[in-house]
Amino acid sequence: ALFNYLFAKQNNGKFILRIEDTDMERSKKEYEEDIINNLKWLDLEWDEFYKQSTRKEIYQKYLQKLLDEDKAYFEDMVIRFRNPNQIVAFNDLIRGEIKFETTELEDFVIAKNLQTPLFHFAGAVDDFEMKVSHVIRGEDHISNTPRQILIQEAINAPRPLYAHIPLILGPDRSKLSKRHGAASLDEYRELGYLPEALINFLAFLGWNPGTDQEIFSMQELVEQFNLSKVQKSGAIFNIEKLSWINSQYIKKMDIDELIGKCEPYIKISNLKSQISKIKKIIKLKQERMDTLAEAGEGIEYFFEQPEYKKETLLWKQEKSLEKTKQHLEKVLEILKKIEENDFTSHNIKEKVWPYAEEQGRGNVLWPLRMALSGLEKSPEPFIISEILGKKETLNRIQNAIKKI
């Protein structure tokens, strides 16, 4: 869909969304809704929309025409195309000339009956009726092309130009599947990937601009996309690359917009009432986030008292809990002197750092970190202090002192 969209926009053409739902057993309303919702989410707006299930009279007309001209016939309750057994050649815009000896296709089925055409027939008729100039699709459709060309010739339809793009492969170069961890667009959306990042990533699955640029806006993709730069071999799906691209979009995002997108992933009560704290947390995480979902990971200690054993307050080279208690009491004394309005990470560090340098940074900052977060790995205690605010910071240090 993306390559079709880019090609259409670049050439002032029309991007057609066609729901191929003539097979009622395989076609379900939810599948159609998924396609529509995903294209809208990716901002791939179509110019024309068709459902094959509403076009049965059109297909019936062409089926009857072929029957009347003896180019098709009924056999065993189906309609078969009378194969002229000729060589079909076409120039693929990506792969060059492709030839097929069609005798092996025999007289292939084109419809179950006059009301139920099969994929090959309905597609060929639609391409003619909709004046489709270019068909850009996966290489797994190459084998379908000779059938559709034969049908086009039989109904006197002009042949569109074909471009068969490479399939997306897993790291082992087999066709991408669930066993590679592949997910639907819905799942990537739920995991916190941005539509812009997915568009950017998908564009590089088979296409290369020939430059070092890796981050492209939609407009840049429209301007630079070229079928001549689409590779023939399969494109390897790399989730790490997708995550990196996603992180670049997150880093560039306005903080208020980012907060809005992260809200569904932050599972805390009274979210709106704590928006100033949330803003500081998101700002802190923005540079390191690969996905929006990560905004809600490991932030519980900002909203509730951490649980830890008093022994964890000890720095690895410090043996005395009493000494650790004295360090916390001194830090508490220092922080109390900082005005509420000046309680920033910069000012906190400026005041605490000389004491930490004097007593040993680990001896002072480790118990402070544990008292504030309960975690061995967390942001700097100065940053945590600013986000918690003066009152909560002092409260947590006092609780740590009481533990000892």
Image (spheres, grey):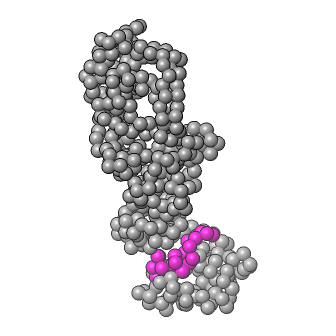
Which residues, given as a range, are shown in magenta? 371-390
| Residue 95 point in image, percent of width and height | 53, 39
Against 385, is 132 above or below? above
Nearest the camera: 226 or 339?
Answer: 226
| Residue 277 point in image, percent of width and height | 42, 72
Q: Residue at x 57, y 67 (%)?
A: 307
Please tell me how many numbered marks the rendered image carries: 0
Residue 187 appears in the figure? no
Kindly give the residue lying farthest to the top in the view shown. Answer: 76
Judge whether residue 205 is colored magenta: no
The quarter of the picture where the C terminus appears is bottom right
Nearest the camera: 125 or 282?
Answer: 125
The quarter of the picture where the N terminus appears is top left
| Residue 82 point in image, percent of width and height | 41, 13
131 displayed left or right of 307:
left
Q: Residue at x 51, y 16 (%)?
A: 103
Against 285, is 135 above or below? above
- Magenta stretch, overall SS: helix
Q: Residue at x 36, y 46 (%)?
A: 8
Q: Residue at x 29, y 16 (%)?
A: 65
Where is residue 254, by image quadrant?
bottom left
Nearest the camera: 121 or 45?
Answer: 121
Against 276, is 2 above or below? above
Residue 162 appears in the figure? yes
